[in-house]
Image: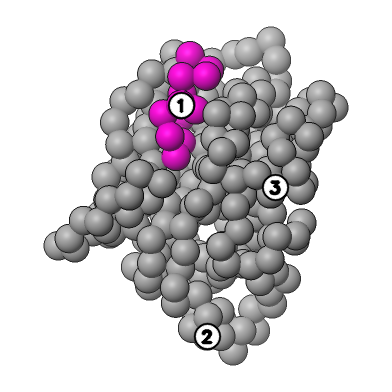
């Protein structure tokens, strides 16, 4: 299992600390450390670009004060890794980023397994997509980046129904944060709030440690987009799937 979390603060919420979102993710990752102890990473955005720091090691070893200082922006996401698919090495550390033509960058944090990753990877490779890791997370990211559509909403909702497995995802772009669970709801993901900021995390302990409040669980198959207007469900991948919940 891995730990994933994310935060989106509205544009009008000013902070004296330009890296406040990343700092909150740092403390949230501490609460999720037990979910993955091989590597940790945080991605942040200022609405224009994504900045990422990821290294091997525990949360307290990975991030220094200068690291957090460069992760400026009002939105961020974090990940602690326990490897299931892909070796335990820096190339497979998350968040992983991809760039899509016409849309820019996307960062992804993934908890779970995509059991048809090899088939998707082979199909994308046949189309000329180049892979740099052995992780199924990169496969998911590239599937989204190369899906049809003129927006991230369209590409995400087109690509995700092709995935088979048990997973939850946090995605970050310069314009939105996404929280997504597989159709069976096997892997957990919750929605929280701190003031006017919205948060997501694998476990509500990540909310407790920063003084946020649990709002609800992300529903099985729900594709939740969080922007300045708050969370909006943009798709339901579950349709009539049965549920198969797992606390991890």
The extreme left residue here reads: 240
> Is 198 or 60 nearer to us in this picture?
60
Q: Which residue is mark 3?
A: 39
219 inside magenta stretch = no
Say which element carries label 2. Answer: helix
Q: Which residue is mark 1?
A: 205
Q: Which residue is mark 2?
A: 123
Mark 1 → mark 2, Cα distance in angstroms? 39 Å
Residue at coordinates 52% horizontally, 31% vertically from top-left?
7
210 inside magenta stretch = yes
Q: Which mark's residue is nearer the viewer, 2 or 3? A: 3
The boundaries of the magenta stretch are 199-211
Residue at coordinates 41% horizontally, 29% vertically from top-left?
204
* Residue contact at pointers 2 and 3, CB within 8 angstroms: no
> Is 87 or 74 nearer to us in this picture?
87
Residue at coordinates 32% horizontally, 49% vertically from top-left?
246
> Is 160 or 248 nearer to us in this picture?
248
């Amino acid at each position: 299992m891995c730990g994933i979390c994310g935060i989106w603060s509205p544009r009008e919420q000013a902070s004296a600390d330009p890296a406040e979102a990343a700092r909150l993710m740092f403390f949230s990752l501490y609460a999720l450390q037990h979910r993955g102890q091989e590597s940790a990473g945080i991605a942040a955005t200022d609405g224009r670009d994504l900045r990422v720091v990821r290294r091997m090691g525990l949360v307290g070893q990975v991030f220094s004060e200068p690291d957090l200082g460069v992760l400026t922006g009002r939105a961020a996401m974090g990940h602690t890794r326990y490897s299931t698919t892909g070796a335990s090495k820096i190339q497979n550390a998350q968040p992983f980023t991809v760039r899509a033509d016409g849309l820019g960058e996307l960062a992804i944090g993934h908890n779970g397994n995509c059991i048809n990753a090899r088939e998707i990877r082979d199909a994308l490779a046949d189309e000329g997509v180049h892979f740099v890791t052995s992780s199924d997370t990169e496969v998911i990211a590239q599937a989204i980046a190369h899906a049809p559509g003129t927006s991230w909403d369209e590409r995400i909702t087109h690509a995700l129904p092709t995935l088979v497995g048990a997973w939850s995802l946090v995605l970050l772009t310069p314009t939105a944060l996404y929280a997504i669970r597989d159709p069976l709801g096997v892997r957990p993901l919750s929605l929280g709030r701190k003031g006017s900021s919205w948060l997501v995390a694998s476990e509500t302990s990540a909310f407790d440690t920063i003084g946020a409040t649990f709002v609800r669980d992300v529903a099985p198959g729900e594709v939740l987009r969080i922007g300045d207007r708050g969370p909006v469900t943009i798709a339901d991948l579950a349709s009539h799937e049965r549920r198969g919940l797992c606390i991890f």
